[in-house]
């Protein structure tokens, strides 16, 4: 559950158990925009050891957990 913070508390209503994952070529710009809007950053930009790509996570104003990652193709 440490990797999925929205699934740890059944008392949370908005976004409980729900994650959205985005891949983008503009991650740094999106991160700066989120900071400028005052959105709650849950995880600063870091290297995800699985795909070896940078990503960050935040909560949107409705409480949903969003992860944004550098664009990459998923390997099969």
Image (cartoon, rainbow, N blue to C red):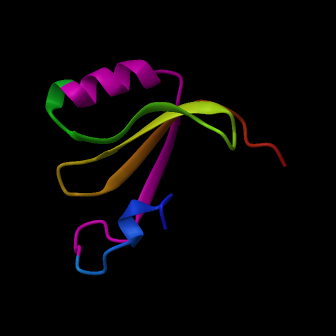
Residue 43 x %, y %: 38, 40
Describe residue 76's horizontal placement relative to residue 29 as left or right: right
Instruction: Choose top left, top right, bottom left or bottom right for residue 34.
Output: top left
Q: Is residue 39 shown above or below 10? A: above
Residue 8 x %, y %: 38, 72
Describe residue 29's horizontal placement relative to residue 12 as left or right: right
Q: Is residue 65 shown above or below 7? A: above
Residue displayed at 49% across by 68% down: 1
Residue 50 x %, y %: 69, 44
Residue found at the very far right of the displayed protein: 76
Residue displayed at 34% across by 26% down: 31
Describe residue 12's horizontal placement relative to residue 31 as left or right: left
Instruction: Choose top left, top right, bottom left or bottom right for residue 13.
Output: bottom left
State the extent of the magenta-drawn residues as a range. 12-35
Residue 5 x %, y %: 39, 61
Residue found at the very far front of the displayed protein: 2
Residue displayed at 62% across by 31% down: 53
Q: Is residue 74 magenta?
A: no
Report the front residue among 70 and 48: 48
In this figure, what is the number of numbered marks? 0
Q: Is residue 25 magenta?
A: yes
Q: Is residue 35 shown above or below 41? A: above
């Amino acid at each position: 559950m440490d990797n999925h913070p929205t699934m740890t508390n059944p008392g949370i209503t908005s976004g409980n158990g729900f994650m959205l994952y985005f891949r983008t070529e503009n991650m740094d710009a999106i991160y700066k925009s989120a900071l400028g809007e005052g959105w709650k950053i849950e995880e600063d930009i870091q290297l995800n050891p699985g795909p070896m790509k940078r990503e960050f996570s935040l909560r949107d104003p409705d409480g949903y957990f969003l992860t944004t990652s550098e664009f990459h193709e998923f390997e099969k």
